[in-house]
Image: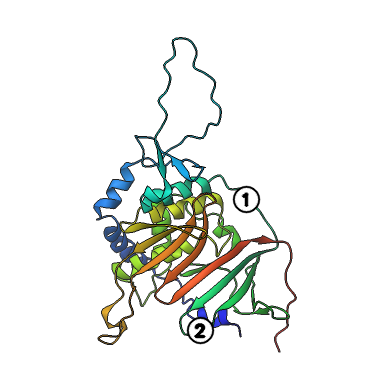
Amino acid sequence: MTDLTELKDGWGEPDPPMPAARTAARAALMREMTTSTTIRESRRHGRRFGWLVGGTVVVAAAAAVAVVLSPAQPPPSPGEQQAKPAPTVPLDEMSGQQVLRLAAGVAETRPEDTGVAWHVFEESAMKEYPVSLIHQWTTREGVHYAMNEGDPGARLYVLNKGFFVGGRELSLERVQNMPTDPDKLVEWLSEGYVRDNYVPTPEEMAGRIPFAMANLLYEVPTPPAVRSAALRALAEMPNVTNLGAVEGGQALKVVFEEMPADKWAPGERPPDTGQMTMVIDPGTATLVSITTYQGTRKILSAGWTHDLPKIIPEK
């Protein structure tokens, strides 16, 4: 057993939900996530974004974030009016939503790759656990292996097959064909958490969706259009704050509904519940780390590999 097994012991999946339960949860979630004025405002703005230029972002006046990267434009022809240069906005002066939209535009341009397994290498610094460096591999067939850094080899760490996405285990083909529209992606992910004997409340769902979106950025081999949709969906959430530049990128705090009051005894609720802080490099659309009240997971690398580790057979 690895540390990863303990950290992810809640990933067992019950039977798929009945249609009526899915419909009820979807309706409740969409009511919850479309009532915010901020969300409505964000949907009225443009969704195309620009590039990092010397630590700043070129922004057009008519859009939330916009488009200009042109190192050498030819002079205007006689009689042609010289276009006014667009204003520049430093990353630290952008809103959290703007940073996410910028990263979404970059994500669409990132090349796709392939390999024999999806490899994630992360540093896990969870409270009540020692800091661990953990490798995990998921083959194209959905077989999972994991090991701690320095171990002689990797072991099969779950019997289930598939890529973990929200409340589902998916084939590689399904992962690469998830919805690419942000609203439809939120709706589709929300359905995966509904069970025949359990329908999450809108507050509970509002806390799960941000984590599901963040996981799409590194835990599974999503194509560029899906990664972009996940970033745009995060940008449409009402409480996203740009905390400024940190090592590796921009720190963004996402505040969602508080967890149920009965989860902790009176006076024992840890600070910083009901929120997460992501560090994102908007120039590469890379998720660098996720921090919650439970600790921090730093993503050191995530991508396809053509090499599997030595596999230690189960005894």
Disc 2 designates what residue? 129
Secondary structure under tag 2 reads loop
Secondary structure under tag 1 reads loop
Q: Residue 38: where, in percent of width, then height?
A: 27, 51
Question: Viewer-proximal residue, 120 or 145?
Answer: 120
Q: Which mark is residue 145?
A: none
Disc 1 designates what residue? 112
Kindly tell me whether residue 97 is visible in this rendering. yes
At horizontal 47% and vertical 40% (from top left) the residue drawn is 50
At horizontal 56% and vertical 44% (from top left) the residue drawn is 109
Amino acid type at circle 2 is: Tyr
Q: Name which quarter of the figure residue 153 lies in.
A: bottom right
The correct choice, above or below, for 235 with respect to 158 in the image is above
Amino acid type at circle 1 is: Glu
In the image, 228: left or right of 207? right
Q: The N terminus appears in which quarter of the rendering? A: bottom right
Q: Name which quarter of the figure residue 46 lies in.
A: top left
| Disc 1 crowd, CA 10 A, few/some/many (<14, 14-19, 20+) | few
Q: The C terminus appears in which quarter of the rendering? A: bottom right
Instruction: Tell which circle, 1 or 2, labels the residue nearer the N-terminal end.
Output: 1
Kindly tell me whether residue 49 is visible in this rendering. no
Question: Viewer-proximal residue, 192 or 3?
Answer: 3
At horizontal 45% and vertical 36% (from top left) the residue drawn is 67
| Disc 2 crowd, CA 10 A, few/some/many (<14, 14-19, 20+) | few
Measure the C-alpha gap from mark 1 to mark 2: 35 Å
Q: How many numbered dots are placed on residues in this image? A: 2
Q: Residue 283: where, in percent of width, then height?
A: 52, 49
